Amino acid sequence: MKAVTMSVPQTQAGDLLERVTVALLLGFVAALQLSIALANILLAAMLASWVVWRVRERARPSAPAFFTALLAYGALTLVASAFSVDPRESFIDSKQLVLFAIVPAVYDIARGHRASTVVDVIISVGGAIAVIGVIQYGVLHYDNLGQRPQGTLTHYMTYSGILMLVLGVAAARLVFGSRDRIWPALVMPALVAAIALTFTRNAWIGACVAVGLLCILRDFRLTAVLPVILAALFVLAPEGLVSRLTSTFNAQDPANQDRFAMMEIGARIVADHPLTGVGPNMVPRVYEQYRPDYAVNKTNPHLHNVPLQIAADRGLPALAVWLWFVAAAARALVRMFRSGSHRVLASAALASLAAMLAAGLFEYNFGDSEFLMLLLVLITLPFAAARPADAAADHA
């Protein structure tokens, strides 16, 4: 009788800790789109609560198979830091590797039906910040390249990247969802408008690739509709956005010219430092010595290209491991989608991955903490959803 009496409070305490951990996860994914400071606080609280919960349950942490590649990438990042131009600064910059803990945490916390709840929060908050961006453009005159909509975040590039991911999630539920499609349909116009109004070309490309992939997964014939939609948006867009779009194809555009210079700089850095790169966050330190005469900016914080930045920062082995991570995640998600299991979440994750890759050819989005955190959440959710909602059942 005593054993029964003692086990009840322990079970209640465990259930309470689990509910708190889930609440912290939902708060964290909401805060990602609102404030990096709040998101970091909630992430730390969530990870701490999750660890305590797992210890109480005597359960070992686990993760999807692609997490192995992320760990290897983290290890090579630390090696690159050790051989960096400034090891101390590179090791400090490598603190971002802690964010990889999001994968096993979300895999454990968001199991079963909770994964769909996380998506509900992401879409709802994304719709809200999209409306804020539209208001900033139309009312507060955030309507030029010098002052672009940034929602509640600190930079328009982060804002547009987050919106790009949310748009992919909303579109996936709209295309593949059998229910709960009304809310994504209502949110979608605000998301499209907000992304367009940021003047951010890499996000435009990423969003188009994400939606295009979803159309291909649903029915290849749907891709015929995309040019019509894009043409309509082009006709209806303000003159400033049209000029921004057409500048994409102008090789003499200063921004494009500087992109070409950064490609050359990156190639030169990799040629001199193929194995470990110059070290994380060291490209600005060496930028000037590799800078060609036709470069527009004296320096840049990064090379505006994910593969090139990784190779220059961390070396070609790290780039190969990063490509392994992308391929492993994509392969597992495609397999899950084809099996018919959790198609909304699997397609949303694939759209997010495709958007990151496409936009990442023109922006170092994988190095943006807010963007990376949301990406890791989205590509982990399908695998979490496939697990039993009851943790005890998963370990049985």
Image (cartoon, helix red, strand yellow):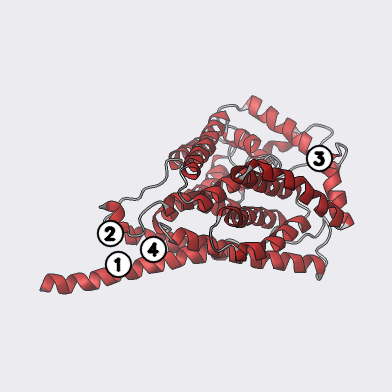
- Res 14 → quadrant: bottom left
Mark nearer the viewer, 3 or 1: 1
Q: Secondary structure at mark 1?
A: helix
Quadrant for the N terminus, please. Answer: bottom left
Q: Which residue is mark 2?
A: 57
The residues bearing labels 2 and 4 have C-alpha atoms spaced at a distance of 12 Å
Q: Residues within 10 Å of mark 4 (few under 14, many from 20)?
A: some
Kindly tell me whether residue 42 is visible in this rendering: no
Q: Label 3 belongs to which residue?
A: 256
Identify which residue, 112 or 341, lies in the foreground: 341
* Structural distance between the alpha carbons of marks 3 and 1: 55 Å
Callout 4 touching callout 1 (CB < 8 Å): no
Q: Earlier in the sequence, mark 3 or mark 4?
A: 4
How many residues crowd around disc 2 within 10 Å: few (fewer than 14), some, or many (20 or more)?
Answer: few
Residue sitting nearer the eye, 261 or 144: 144
**Quick one: label 2 or label 4, which is nearer the N terminus?**
4
Q: Residue at x 56, y 53 (%)?
A: 176
Q: Cα distance, mark 3 to mark 4?
A: 46 Å
Q: Give whichever of discs 4 and 1 has the lower sequence position.
A: 1
Q: Which residue is mark 4?
A: 49
- Name the mark on residue 196: none
Q: How many marks?
A: 4
Looking at the image, tell me whether mark 3 or mark 1 is earlier in sequence order. Answer: 1
Which of the two labelled residues, at mark 1 and mark 2, occupies the earlier sequence position? 1
How far across and how far down the image is residue 171, in percent?
62, 55
Q: Callout 2, which amino acid?
A: Glu
x, y percentage for residue 179? 54, 62
- Residues at badges 1 and 2 in contact (C-beta under 8 Å)? yes
